[in-house]
Amino acid sequence: MGAKEAKPEAKRLTYKGITLDAIKRFYDAIKLYDKAIEIDPNYPNAFFNKGNSLNQLKKYDKALDCFDKAIQLNSKYHVAFNNRGISLKKLKRFAEALSSYDQAIDLANEPECFYNKGNILDDLNKYEDALKCYDKAIELNPLDALAFNNKGVTLDNLGRFEQGLIFYEKAIELEPEFEEAYVNKGLCLFDLERFQEALEMFDLVLEKNPDHQLALKTRNQTIEMLNKESDQ
């Protein structure tokens, strides 16, 4: 079933809800989406955006219901399949999430769908398949720092630390404020026993975010390793 033209007031309320989502007023946005649905119960965008708000509020079961309704109303709604996959992943329904991403990919060859599919495959320890998804995401969007970072994580999981390092550095080049990429680069350098360089990465993170627990913990471990080296 394809999407039908929405009633103007339902569209207006939905667009207003999107502006509230943008400033993290998710509950207020949902009220507007509900009004839009009351006016036009066949408007898939209202269900889709309500699902997005519910995902932000970690109400994944309810979000899933909204995405399912949006897809029922518009079977070619590829972003609804994609975001449905996000809800399913959060609910640890991985096989269903992969299927939802595949449906999104069949409808539209978009990088986010490959990126999200790669994340699930990495969680399932299907690292080579995850790499293929990240490669496709990067091919479609070579400016996607997240895909470079997560490909680095997967390479690390395979023990391919030197290669992983390259992808963290690319992620940082694309987004110099990308905290997670600095942490991951530090962890990778630690695994390579390049402890002084790892320490520099953790110090960079902690300079801007002194409460970053993983950086704090691994920095302490790095100092211990440096002390052991100096004692030898």
Image (cartoon, rainbow, N blue to C red):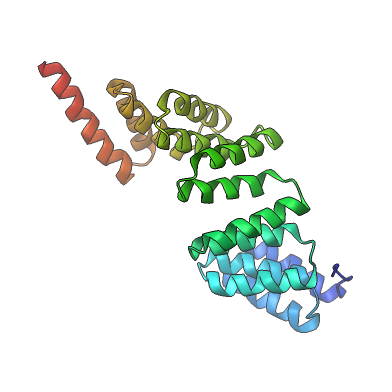
Task: State the residue lying farthest toward the right.
Answer: 5
The residue lying at 22 percent from left, 35 percent from top is: 220
Q: In this view of the protein, can residue 32 be seen by the observer?
A: yes
Q: Quadrant of residue 179?
A: top left
Left-right relation of 225 to 8: left
Q: Quadrant of the C terminus?
A: top left
Along the line of sight, which residue is nearer the eye, 214 or 165? 165
The residue lying at 68 percent from left, 61 percent from top is: 81
Q: Quadrant of residue 201?
A: top left
Q: Position of residue 199 (x, y in %)?
A: 30, 27
Task: State the residue lying farthest toward the left.
Answer: 231
**In the figure, 209 relative to 152: above or below?**
below
Task: State the residue lying farthest toward the bottom.
Answer: 38
The residue lying at 67 percent from left, 54 percent from top is: 102
Q: Quadrant of residue 140?
A: top right
The residue lying at 49 percent from left, 26 percent from top is: 169
Left-right relation of 113 to 92: right
Q: Quadrant of the N terminus?
A: bottom right
Q: Position of residue 76 (x, y in %)?
A: 80, 61
**In the figure, 76 relative to 32: above or below?**
above
Q: Position of residue 168 (x, y in %)?
A: 48, 30
Q: Position of residue 124 (x, y in %)?
A: 47, 51
